Amino acid sequence: MGYTDVDQLAINTIRLLAVDATAKANSGHPGAPMGMAPVAHVLFNKFMTFNPKNPKWVNRDRFVLSNGHGCMLQYALLHLFGYAVSLDDLKNFRQLDSITPGHPESHDTPGIEVTTGPLGQGFANAVGLAIAQAHTGALFNKPGFDLINNHTYVFFGDGCAMEGVASEAASMAGHLKLGNLICIYDDNHISIDGDTKCAFTEDVMARFESYGWHTEWVKDGDNDLEAIEAAIRRAKEVTDKPSVIKLTTTIGYGSKLQGTGGVHGNPLKADDIEGVKKRFGFDPAQSFVVPQQVYDMYNQHAAEGAAAEQKWNDLFAKYASEYKAEHADLARRLAGKLPEGWEKSLPTYKPSDPAIATRKLSEAVLEKVHSVVPELLSGSADLTGSNNTRWKNAVDFQPPEYGIGEWSGRYLRYGVREHAMAAAMNGLAAYGTVIPAGGTFLNFVSYAAGAVRLSALSRVRTIHVATHDSIGLGEDGPTHQPIETLAHFRALPNVMVWRPADGNETSAAYYSALTSQHTPSILALTRQNLPQLEESTIERALRGGYPVVEAPGAAVTIVSTGSEVSICIDAATYLKEKHGIVARVVSIPCFEVFDAQDKEYRLSVLPDGIPVLSVEALTTMGWERYSHEQFGLNRFGASGPYKKVYERFEFTPEGISKRAISTIEFYKGHSVRSPVNRAFQQIL
Amino acid sequence: MGYTDVDQLAINTIRLLAVDATAKANSGHPGAPMGMAPVAHVLFNKFMTFNPKNPKWVNRDRFVLSNGHGCMLQYALLHLFGYAVSLDDLKNFRQLDSITPGHPESHDTPGIEVTTGPLGQGFANAVGLAIAQAHTGALFNKPGFDLINNHTYVFFGDGCAMEGVASEAASMAGHLKLGNLICIYDDNHISIDGDTKCAFTEDVMARFESYGWHTEWVKDGDNDLEAIEAAIRRAKEVTDKPSVIKLTTTIGYGSKLQGTGGVHGNPLKADDIEGVKKRFGFDPAQSFVVPQQVYDMYNQHAAEGAAAEQKWNDLFAKYASEYKAEHADLARRLAGKLPEGWEKSLPTYKPSDPAIATRKLSEAVLEKVHSVVPELLSGSADLTGSNNTRWKNAVDFQPPEYGIGEWSGRYLRYGVREHAMAAAMNGLAAYGTVIPAGGTFLNFVSYAAGAVRLSALSRVRTIHVATHDSIGLGEDGPTHQPIETLAHFRALPNVMVWRPADGNETSAAYYSALTSQHTPSILALTRQNLPQLEESTIERALRGGYPVVEAPGAAVTIVSTGSEVSICIDAATYLKEKHGIVARVVSIPCFEVFDAQDKEYRLSVLPDGIPVLSVEALTTMGWERYSHEQFGLNRFGASGPYKKVYERFEFTPEGISKRAISTIEFYKGHSVRSPVNRAFQQIL
């Protein structure tokens, strides 16, 4: 309350920085920053606690710009509050190598919590951030030590409101009663196609109420700072529900095109810029102007944030003496370190152990590891019993009043919401105190492709437990049998795609996933049982690829993954017995890890002089990188008992042998170079 | 009204067919069929008009089982009403080569409108079916000729209700006021994880009301047939809104596990089956029993449907004389034929024509073709101006009362709802009278991956206009720049992925997309301008790949697509001028079409003896199939002006030349076989 001219000056400064930066770049979105500058000012300066000098302080309030195209708003705020974002950085908006790219990227820019732009994602990330706060607070807060009590604030627009991923996340947040989540909906009635009345006429607030949210409406979001403040204050008071504030604004406020689509995604024209600057009392001849009073005001708030962190640090030091174990645990998590020796808990297997489905072997890992890696939060999109993602004594993460879980619970019931699950996992991982793992069928990780892509781009450690990974799921049929899915995610940069063949490889996959701090993983796991391999160990599997049948004088190398490896081993026996042909067999459970090995090692696995046949019951696409010839499934599968489906498509010792023989014949008399040899390196 | 024992007998027959079929298969979902048998009976027998002897009659009522795992319900109904689904087919449920696969597949089974199972899809397909009805009715109905007036009915469960794609579709349907759409929500409180209260506590009906839907609630969906009938009747009376009926049911009604998750996805045990049969007055010793009274009752309704079709055929014949042109148009559409000579309207280009972005060239095709292909319905997910999907005088498809369009309009404003757009397009295509094209950025086709997969599996003709197809989009940066996307969809069976390099190739892409009656297409198009190639023609491009620079004695073949083709041509010139090296250049705008050419042709394009380098500013994955060495982008892109981004990643004549020289060096002294040669054929 008690807003002055300096507040208005700050707001107009933000607006004009967005105008100038988009004009200089001749690219970008001035409309949302101009419309949302007032609420951004009130929120950041009156409500949010953060220390620009340490953007990673754990108890900072989180801010997510889900309408990421409006990122000049956020970049301007970061600059004005004193984050390591300079005025030159703003002048380099959308230029190569700047820290102010076209959409906010968390690994590029201090103060950006999550990478946004693809609509709906930020909103769902924020639900993850809010879950992480509630969980971490429940674990570590003690009487007199309210260590973790931050809020998560989100801006989102009509685009996010229309996206299914945000709908799923909103339903989840309502169910979970996340009172620490406050979202501000920029109700400006404009999307790229113009007036939202052409496609979006639902009652958004009524929808959020149906999810169990508290709602507020600020009718004049352009000017009524007091109303904005009051609405946020009331939202904070509602602690048993997430809140959404509908803020009716004028997109591009100040421009002569204000309130139209013309100001959404295009820089203002020169005369318009001149007019806006005059209207706001700025010198039209100058650009990127920040009045000192504005810096002063924001610096003061930043200083308060720094002081708050100092106070928190003092409290946390005191906590060390009273709650030693908890202090050590939280400090360790914040340092990004796993507990010493945790990996000793990973189960190992002998060849004589029984055949088990890798989804069950994954469950065995979780059963063993959950107690030594307390930051691991498992969950599933309504397929708990099928994904085997829940250890026996797991407690659900639920509002305690439901009587079916606790805030400290470590198992998330995401519901049938694959996309929101993956996006929430990105937020969970970004919070900094938990490692999320979430299950669904491999085929339905595709529903979450938009979020998995951002896991990879934003370099977060998320673990996708993707069961029922091939035609081996059998009767559910082609609608559920992945064909293209592994190729898709193997083609996505910075994702570890694992398809383990047995227990040791499954343990290796988890070791890799849990220790890859800046990389998401997808673990493709079987529904059907698989035997334990003779030659597998965790260490060998951790090289990404290794021989499981080594045979001097081999005429062919057969490379494979997961459920097909043991069939390939049988094929090698079959080739020997029926045809007198010697075959090597290689398991490549993870392309990305194998690619990272030195060339000498890779050549020892896939040596020169021996033609290579790949075998995987999925598309052959991508296998050309490791093999000369490929046997796979470049068509949809079939519904039936899985052994019959395997036979139909000839993934049998006989079927593989037939193709191995063809491969040997085809390369007879030709010099064979290992596919490991390449003419040049890729740009990375 | 006036339900008798025969009605109850029919309902229990359906239930027991589901029980017996899942038990025999030892696989499948009895719970939903047992719970929804009453509403299915009332809907099919009292409301729906269809002719089982001609499942393709255009004015049939459409039924979509969005909770497709309950497909034994639908298979039982199809059998009982006399579709070409025999009792033996039910006994072969979920067996290899049966027409009763684990989830309903429209190309397998007569009477299945759309392929469902992946949750939420069927619901969104139904929105497309309803749009198609409204549009087709508006075009062809005349006074006295109410030719197209069918309803679309949907069953969906909690899983579908939680999925974002269904939320998007429901919002769209509410906006569009689709009064011809009636959805029945199986409110059984059970999902795979058990009671829905663990994850799904929103007020579903309030949410649908917020979208603008009419809602009904039947409290005893297990027994109250009169209430079910009354609710459907009231829903039909509401013609200016879609309707949803919440039907509270008991999953697995009749089983001793009824009302629990135990009956959702597992067959009933033997003693339970015995109990259910006794409870329903059936002989526990017998299986797959259909009392004759049940056949008789359903046969009578089927006969009424056949009579309705006959009446419609008579009306349509009369229509021929009064509305000759309209009759011919509709008859042609129903025959699946495009208008004679339509392809003459495709624009062609000369090398001297100006450089134009392929998204603009796509617009030019739509501008020319829309008037000769009246069944083409374009649209975009809120990126109309960027996707260039709207021809100049297009009319929007909108309820006329908004004053911004007409039911007969041919441009759909899908809103920011990529997944629902793609799923609705599947329904539009399945209706049989329209061809849907829908635009978004290529990167966001990934949001719709779940639906695109079903386009391919269900063999429908949908056209995805996917613009901004690479780092060439520039400033928007890595969040918007596809890397993995083309590899993903090229790996998906039965999709034509086109990446045209100029105007003639763009016209070819549309020719292919529009004439591929059983295959969806993705057209990857540039934001940036591209020159017209010297050697391109529609005919040459329609072979999927062809030389654009032919050069006797070439030392290397460079294969490329889209925006990189002209850079490769410049690279060939550069190689000649700077290094005296002769290079051929090949454009492969569509892998799938190229793969379908005979081997002799493919070898002429990629001849033996010359090493092949591929160049595409996307992942290299998949290019190994056509090249020995690959130049691409196996990392995320960068935000900046596009030319600078291209330079950074060396997609320049120099950068390509460097790699071409490395390729030539690498293969010097080695025998080089064309990648067209393979040791064996894939199973298709």
Image: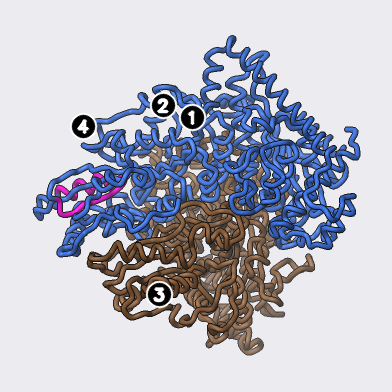
Chain colours: A brown, B blue
CB within 8 Å, label 4 to label 3:
no
Q: Is residue A91 visible?
A: no
Give the residue number, with chain letter if any, for mark 2.
B369
Q: Residues within 10 Å of mark 4 (few under 14, many from 20)?
A: few
Given residues B32 and B480, the one toward you in this image is B32
* Mark-to-mark CA distance, 4 and 2: 23 Å
Q: Is residue B7 magenta?
A: no
Which secondary structure, mark 4? loop
Spatial CA distance of label 2 from label 3 is: 61 Å
Q: Is residue B166 left or right of residue B305?
A: left
Do the dots labelled 2 and 3 sit on one chain?
no
Whether residue A191 sits left or right of residue B5 in the image: it is left
Say which of marks 1 and 3 sits in front. 3
Q: Which residue is mark 1?
A: B376
Kind of residue indicated by mark 2: Val
Residue B302: percent from the left, percent from the top?
74, 31
Q: Looking at the image, which residue is at 51% across and 52% down? A: A636
Q: Can you identify the residue that label 3 sits on?
A: A576
**Which residue does the numbered mark 4 point to in the structure image?**
B352
Q: Are marks 1 and 2 in contact (CB under 8 Å)?
A: yes
Q: Chain of mark 1?
A: B
Secondary element at tag 2: helix
Q: CA distance from mark 1 to mark 2?
A: 9 Å
The answer to whether A676 appears left or right of B184 in the picture is left
